[in-house]
Amino acid sequence: MTPPPLDGVVVLDFSELLPGPFFTQNLVELGATVIRIERPPHGDKLGRLAPAIFTAVNRGKQRFMLDLREASGRAAVRQWLGRADVLVESYRPGVLAKYGLDYASLQADHPGLIYVSLSGYGQDGPDAPLPGHDANYLAAAGVLSLAGDPDGAPHTGLGVPVADLCGASYALSALLAALFQRERTGQGQHLDVALAEGPLHWMNPRLAAIREGGHTSLAAQRAALARAAYGVFACRDHAYISIAALEDHFWANLCATLDMGRYAGAEFTASPARRVAAKAINHHLASQVLDWDSQPLMARLAAADVPAMLVREPGALSQTRHFVERQLFVDTDAGPLCRFPVPLAGMIAPPPAAAELQVSGAPVFPGVVATWR
């Protein structure tokens, strides 16, 4: 039987709230043993602020309450470090250094340790001490400046915390690369993951396009992102459908399917002309979509090979036929949740219940044994 990809990898997880726990939840799903170390008296504040979210991102982890201000708490962590491959923390820079648990203090005794620090703006630089949340990181990366109408205020979100989850994904990819690198060198390293810098990396295609087009004003930069026959449109039955007929052949398919009026003429056959008239084309398309109920329109566009998809509501996702047939949802204590979306040999879904992990003298959450097995 093939073991899961990260079988045998032990992770000490000091992270809190969403980005770090989401990152380490991915590690659990890939087969790692994740040991959560939380601060007394209540542990991770996410457990009180949003219990369902806390459960969703901490399944299958082993949870311990340790006070790092106490010598016994620090001693327990050092005992675990002898068996750990990875340490994850999400405090502001310098917090764990007060307890001798920063990377510089641990490196000599644990040369193979991969130490992952998630913070808003990184471990150094003038922004490093600042507090922040998702909207702040997107603002710092320039993402929010491009979100909105050419003459309007920036839009603040997409329905999910983009910077938080983007940063968690970069942490995951960087850690997997560091584990692979360690296999060849035997050396661990410190991974400095700044939540503002994942979206900044995502800005590269936009930055290249802005420079190529010579768009100097923010209004021009936003206008340059406009696309004809691209967006979300209301249907007659009050449902919504997304349409993205960007390429010329998809545009031709759309024009053969819906009445696009004068925009179906030769003048708009090529994409550059449609981009200039994007606002007017989208307005016309919206009027056409409004004549249709969502399901018949979706069927018609799909049959015509036009990129389209109904806007699904969150509550219906786990019953969606496509996701059901691909076995994407698993039952958890937090309800049906999407598994790690890329199956690998040996992966376990859903994550198993936390096994007993033993460390002598460690204060623990109810139901967790506190001596090494």
Image (spheres, rainbow, N blue to C red):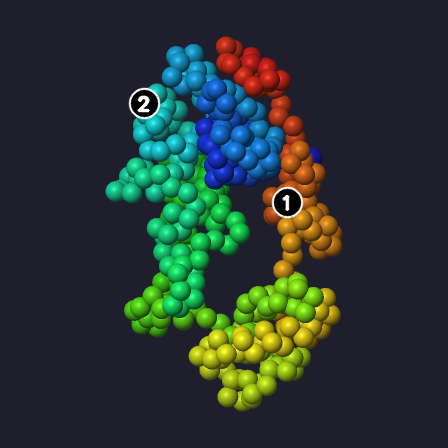
| Near-viewer residue (22 or 172) | 22
| Near-viewer residue (310 or 360) | 310
Residue 166 sits above or below residue 35 on the image: below
Residue 324 sits above or below residue 219 on the image: above
Name the residue located 34 percent from the left edge and 66 percent from the top edge: 218
Is 288 displayed left or right of 220 in the figure?
right
Is 119 displayed left or right of 49 in the figure?
left
Circle 1 residues within 10 Å: few <14, some 14–19, many ≥20 = some
Residue 244 sits above or below residue 254 on the image: above
Most distant residue in the left direction? 126
Callout 2: SS: helix
Q: What residue type is labelled 2?
A: Lys
Where, by quadrant of the figure, is residue 118 drawn? Answer: top left
Residue named by callout 2:
98
Q: What residue type is labelled 1?
A: Cys
**Label ID, residue 338:** 1
Name the residue located 56 percent from the left edge and 87 percent from the top edge: 262
| Near-viewer residue (78 or 63) | 63
How far apart are labels 1 and 2 at the CA level?
A: 38 Å
Examine the rendering and report whether any part of residue 193 can be seen: yes
Image spot of residue 76 (x, y percent): 46, 15
Residue 279 sits above or below residue 100 on the image: below
Image spot of residue 54 (x, y percent): 56, 34
Circle 2 residues within 10 Å: few <14, some 14–19, many ≥20 = few
